[in-house]
Image: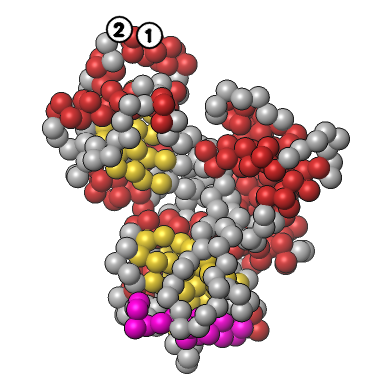
């Protein structure tokens, strides 16, 4: 089976050249271990129960034995033995060399009381997500975000993905294994992911027993409220609609915390630019899954269901677009935000880079009227920014699900189907 190149490949190589250890974070099944194995020279697989039990005993005898091996040494599912974090840190200090260890896992760092040291200065971190369309080889990659930031002129190019393609790819998701399958077999993986999440993962992430039914209802509520800024009380009301027991917002917050620990949920923070106006910026996070297929599986939807319900399709497509943008933003040393102010002006995504450059992006299915409105929104927001205090936007872009071409409008706004975009 041929390995499909990931944007994280170059990120991992770069991080290993400047730090003793690199932690790769992300949801299960997104390809963390496979990517790490492309560069690792030895592996300790703690996802294997036999290896885990033996390693737990060895930790009590001589933890250094677990760290011996050709470097970079991959420690997979390291969080099953939290004390390894400090053992790796100490070994990095002792060796005084870069590129010694890669740690992969499907849940967040252990609580501070489980480790002695944060790892600052020794560890670098990489976030991995399911594949973008460019990584899964569905996007032509004709339009480069890097080129847009560099101000290069973009010539019109054809888009090959139609509405049926996008609906299918959205439901399939960017799970590497699913990209190797066809038809319903590929679609099954997202349903399997949700079932495993509900029945196993949330139960063992921190040893606390939680209701599988409530987790499933929360996932459905999240899916129904995807791409919106909604408070926890909305999820509480949705869950209680089919729940005979009492439920408070603290419990909802706990369930959401666990889903974030497992990298299932990845909400989007608000962008806070310098404005010419006195409009107040709204700061509620926008709700997203790490991959849109989690939403379709939670709701029991397939590609045809999306095509028959364009409103739901549009909201879940926004989640898909944000997934791809986040993958590209990591390599651009940037982060994706949303914008909303008290004047009612909203922008779906702002790709803001560490060097202060940024692009404003609206996300639409692709109707001409929607594109026109989105272009007006982008220009209005650009006009609000105080360019005496921050840079002008590098580009304005309407990112669409479909459309025959990627092109630059006369007003300077780019219209780019997701099937044409790349880093």
| Highlighted magenta segment, given as a residue range | 372-390
Q: Is residue 381 magenta?
A: yes
Local packing at callout 1 (Cα closer than 10 Å; few below 14, some 14-19, many 20+) is few
Q: Which mark is residue 61?
A: 2
Q: Residue furthest left?
A: 96
Residue drawn at (36%, 21%), measured in percent from left and top?
Answer: 83
In this rendering, position of residue 279 left or right of residue 353: right
For residue 340, the mark is: none
Q: How far across and how far down the image is residue 174, in percent?
A: 52, 50
* Residue 388 location (% of width, % of height): 34, 83
Q: Which residue occupies 50% across, 72% down?
A: 361
Q: Nearer the viewer, residue 366 or 236?
A: 236
Do the numbered discs 1 and 2 sit on residues whose CB atoms are within 8 Å? Answer: yes
Relative height, residue 180 to residue 366 (above, below)? above
Q: Residue at x 37, y 14 (%)?
A: 55
Q: Is residue 354 visible?
A: yes
Residue 381 rendering spot, x and y as whole percentages? 51, 81
Front-most of residues 171 and 182: 171
What count of labels does the image hold?
2
Residue named by callout 1: 57
| 311 within the magenta span | no
Viewer-side residue, 155 vs 83: 83
Question: How many residues crowd mark 2 within 10 Å: few (<14), some (14–19), many (20+)?
Answer: few
Can residue 302 be seen from the camera position used here?
A: no
Say which element carries label 1: helix
Q: On the picture, is 355 further left or further right than 82?
A: left
Report the side of 9 relative to 136 (left or right): left
Q: CA distance from mark 1 to mark 2?
A: 7 Å
Which residue corresponds to the image point at 48% horizontal and 91% vertical from the top-left?
411
Which secondary structure type mostly characterizes the magenta part of the structure?
helix
Image quarter of the N terminus: top left
Q: Is residue 281 above or below residue 286?
A: below
């Amino acid at each position: 089976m041929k390995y499909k190149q990931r944007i994280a490949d170059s990120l991992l190589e770069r991080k290993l050249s400047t730090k003793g250890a690199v932690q790769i974070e992300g949801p299960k099944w997104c390809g963390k271990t496979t990517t790490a194995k492309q560069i690792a020279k030895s592996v300790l697989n703690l996802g294997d129960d036999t290896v885990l039990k033996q390693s737990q005993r060895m930790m009590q005898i001589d933890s250094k034995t677990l760290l011996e091996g050709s470097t970079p040494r991959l420690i997979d599912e390291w969080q099953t033995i939290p004390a390894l974090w400090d053992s790796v840190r100490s070994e990095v200090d002792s060796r005084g060399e870069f590129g010694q260890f890669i740690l992969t896992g499907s849940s967040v760092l252990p609580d501070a009381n489980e480790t002695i040291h944060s790892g600052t200065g020794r560890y670098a971190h990489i976030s991995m997500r399911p594949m973008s369309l460019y990584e899964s080889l569905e996007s032509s990659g004709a339009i480069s975000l890097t080129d847009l930031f560099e101000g290069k002129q973009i010539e019109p190019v054809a888009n090959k993905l139609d509405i049926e393609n996008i609906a299918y790819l959205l439901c399939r998701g960017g799970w590497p294994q699913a990209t190797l399958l066809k038809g319903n077999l590929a679609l099954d993986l997202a349903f399997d992911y949700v079932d495993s999440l509900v029945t196993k993962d949330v139960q063992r992430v921190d040893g606390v027993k939680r209701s599988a039914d409530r987790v499933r209802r929360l996932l459905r509520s999240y899916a129904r409220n995807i791409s919106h800024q909604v408070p926890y009380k909305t999820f509480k009301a949705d869950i209680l609609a089919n729940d005979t027991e009492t439920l408070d917002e603290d419990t909802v917050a706990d369930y959401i915390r666990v889903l974030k620990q497992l990298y299932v949920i990845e909400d989007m923070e608000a962008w806070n630019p310098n404005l010419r106006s006195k409009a107040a910026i709204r700061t509620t996070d926008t709700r997203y899954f790490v991959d849109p297929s989690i939403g379709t599986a939670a709701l029991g939807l397939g590609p045809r269901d999306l095509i028959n319900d364009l409103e739901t399709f549009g909201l879940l497509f926004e989640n898909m677009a944000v997934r791809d943008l986040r993958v590209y933003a990591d390599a651009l040393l940037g982060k994706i935000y949303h914008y909303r102010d008290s004047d009612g002006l909203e922008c779906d995504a702002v790709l803001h880079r560490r060097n202060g450059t940024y692009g404003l992006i609206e996300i639409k299915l692709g109707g001409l009227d929607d594109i026109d409105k989105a272009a007006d929104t982008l220009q209005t927001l650009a006009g609000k920014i105080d360019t005496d205090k921050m840079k002008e936007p590098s580009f304005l872009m309407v990112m669409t699900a479909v459309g025959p071409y990627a092109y630059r409008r006369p007003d300077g706004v780019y219209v780019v189907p997701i099937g044409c975009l790349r880093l």
